């Protein structure tokens, strides 16, 4: 059995548990060129939340009565691709479910020597990399000031920490 979380209605204001349903789906099977991934952690990025509206302005609305889209990290359980083996740690667009079948070409292999699995969704994932390369591009140094408009967001929080570590003044 594969536990999935489906969006059953668009939230009115803040999401509530009634906007979602837990669904027992059949266990997926990886075909040629695909991997079966046991999903350990899910990223709760803002983009899918912004698409949980019938009138989404950032892309098509998330479909109702289907697995909520999102990024996850986990372990390859079965591989039908020569570049991956069972036990490999990976990140992919898994959706909100316990097990996901994903094309091997869309999977990122993770180096757990850099940090634990869950960090590859935050500081070692898209938010952390965006913050890192942005702060590198502006050449932060002691005495400089960095103003972060979305300071409470995932990228802004990490950018602020990197700027402070570089000795810069940070305002959000």
Image (cartoon, rainbow, N blue to C red):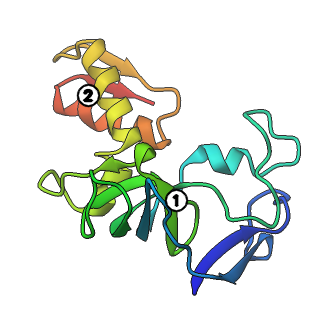
| Quarter of image, res 84 | bottom left
Look at 53% across and 56% down and name the residue there.
44
User: Which residue occupies the foreground of this view, 152 or 124?
Assistant: 124
Observer-side mark, 2 or 1, equals: 1
Farthest residue, direction front: 32
Quarter in which the C terminus is drawn = top left
Which secondary structure lies at badge 1?
loop
The one of 65 and 53 positioned closer to us in this rendering: 65
With respect to residue 11, does 105 lie above or below? above
For label 2, the SS is: helix
Q: Which residue is mark 1?
A: 94
Tell me if residue 141 comes above or below residue 101 in the rendering.
Answer: above
Look at the picture and state if 17 lies above or below 9. below
Residue drawn at x 80%, y 46% as measured from the top left: 61
Q: Quadrant of residue 10?
A: bottom right
Which disc is residue 163 wearing? Answer: 2
Residue located 67% across and 51% down the image: 49
Where's residue 82, x and y in %?
28, 53
Q: Is residue 127 left or right of residue 101?
A: left
Where is residue 93 drawn, in percent x and y?
51, 52
- On the picture, is 14 further left or further right than 26? right
Residue 113 placement, left or right of 162: left
From the viewer's side, name the closer residue of 170 and 166: 166
Expressed as whole percent of the image width and height from the top left, the position of residue 130 reads: 38, 30
Q: Residues within 10 Å of mark 1 (few under 14, many from 20)?
A: many
Q: Residue at x 52, y 72 (%)?
A: 29
| Cα–Cα span, label 2 and label 1 | 32 Å
State the image quarter where residue 160 is shown: top left
Name the spot of residue 27 as percent of width and height, x first: 56, 80
């Amino acid at each position: 059995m594969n536990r999935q979380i489906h969006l059953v209605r668009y939230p009115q204001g803040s999401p509530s548990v009634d906007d979602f349903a837990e669904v027992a789906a059949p266990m997926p099977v990886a075909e040629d060129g695909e991997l079966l991934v046991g999903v350990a952690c899910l990223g709760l990025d803002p983009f899918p939340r912004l698409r949980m509206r019938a009138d989404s302005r950032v892309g098509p609305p998330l479909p109702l009565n289907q697995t909520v889209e999102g990024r996850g990290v986990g372990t390859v359980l079965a591989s039908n691709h020569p570049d991956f083996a069972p036990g490999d740690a990976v990140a992919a667009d898994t959706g909100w479910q316990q097990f996901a079948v994903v094309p091997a070409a869309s999977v990122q292999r993770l180096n757990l020597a850099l940090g634990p699995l869950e960090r590859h969704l935050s500081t070692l994932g898209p938010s952390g990399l965006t913050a890192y390369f942005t702060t590198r591009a502006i050449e932060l140094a002691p005495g400089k000031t960095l103003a972060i408009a979305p300071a409470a967001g995932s990228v802004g929080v990490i950018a602020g920490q990197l700027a402070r570590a570089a000795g810069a003044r940070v305002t959000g």
